[in-house]
Image (cartoon, rainbow, N blue to C red):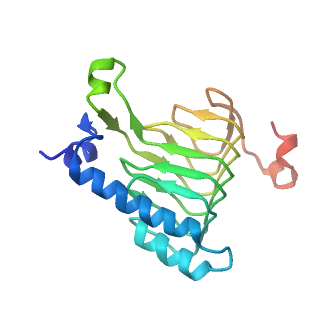
């Protein structure tokens, strides 16, 4: 089994010294670099680069520079996806976003994790667990989503949250660690975010 196959099967794998993975990460970083150097008005070129980088896109989407990822091909986005400045996606495993997902600035989605014991960690071993985000999700500024997390549909994640556990549908969740604080109700159609937390 290759190191890439181990990575995609959620096993410990050699992330730092495997030539195939090193080349794939370098290719993705080159595309990210090219994307980040485009002028804000060059929207068609931005879209084409991201379509080349991402594993799957659906409908229209916007990603604001700078943006960084590890491989790109493990990222799938739904229609009307929006990611603000400084989004980082470490996509060693699949990262899937549903339709109408809005990501505020300075957010990170990290599928990669490392062994606790130093010997294996220093060998360059790591693991990767997928991240899934449902439809109609708003992720506030500075949110960090850890390996293996699923965020349901119709969810708001409050700014600054560290999401280390699954979040169910139809709720507001916030904190470090992130936790559900209440359900989303019909009253929220007329409520600003600063009044719901």
Q: Is residue 58 above or below residue 155?
A: below
- Residue 33 shown left or right of residue 22 in the figure: right
Using the image as rendered, state which of residue 68 and residue 187 is in the foreground: 68
- Residue at the image point whose x is 43% and y is 58% from the top: 29
Which residue shows up at 46% across the image and 54% down it? 69
Residue shown at 58% from the left, 39% from the top: 144
Q: Is residue 110 visible?
A: yes
Give me the residue at 60% from left, 33% from top: 162
Viewer-side residue, 195 vs 32: 32
Q: Is residue 162 above or below residue 50?
A: above
Rendering coords of residue 66 (x, y %):
60, 59
Q: Is residue 159 left or right of residue 21?
A: right
- Between 167 and 160, which is closer to the camera in this rendering? 160
Q: Is 129 on the left-hand or right-hand side of 20?
A: right
Quadrant location of the N terminus in the rendered image: top left
**Residue placed furthest toward the left:** 1
Q: Residue 124, how many percent across, how many down?
A: 29, 33
Q: Is residue 77 visible?
A: no
Residue 73 appears at what percent x and percent y?
36, 61
Q: Position of residue 143 (x, y in %)?
A: 64, 41
* Quarter in which the C terminus is drawn: top right
Q: Is residue 180 left or right of residue 124?
A: right
Q: Number of callouts in the render? A: 0
Quadrant location of residue 118?
top left
């Amino acid at each position: 089994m290759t190191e890439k196959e181990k990575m995609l099967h959620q096993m410990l794998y050699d992330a730092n010294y495997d030539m195939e993975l090193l080349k794939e990460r370098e290719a993705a970083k080159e595309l990210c670099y090219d994307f980040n150097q485009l002028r804000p008005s060059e929207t068609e070129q931005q879209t084409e680069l991201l379509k080349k980088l991402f594993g799957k896109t659906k409908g229209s989407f916007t990603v604001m520079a700078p943006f960084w990822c590890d491989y790109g091909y493990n990222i799938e986005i739904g229609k009307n996806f929006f990611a603000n400045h400084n989004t980082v996606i470490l996509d060693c495993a699949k990262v899937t976003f549903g339709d109408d997902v809005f990501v505020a600035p300075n957010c990170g989605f990290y599928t990669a994790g490392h062994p606790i014991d130093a010997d294996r960690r220093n060998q360059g071993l790591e693991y990767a667990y997928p991240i899934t985000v449902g439809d109609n999700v708003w992720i506030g500024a500075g949110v960090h989503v850890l390996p293996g997390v699923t965020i349901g549909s119709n969810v708001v994640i409050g700014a600054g949250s560290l999401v280390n556990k699954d979040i169910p549908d139809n709720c507001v969740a916030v904190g470090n660690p992130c936790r559900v604080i209440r359900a989303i109700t019909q009253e929220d159609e007329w409520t600003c975010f600063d009044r719901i937390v």
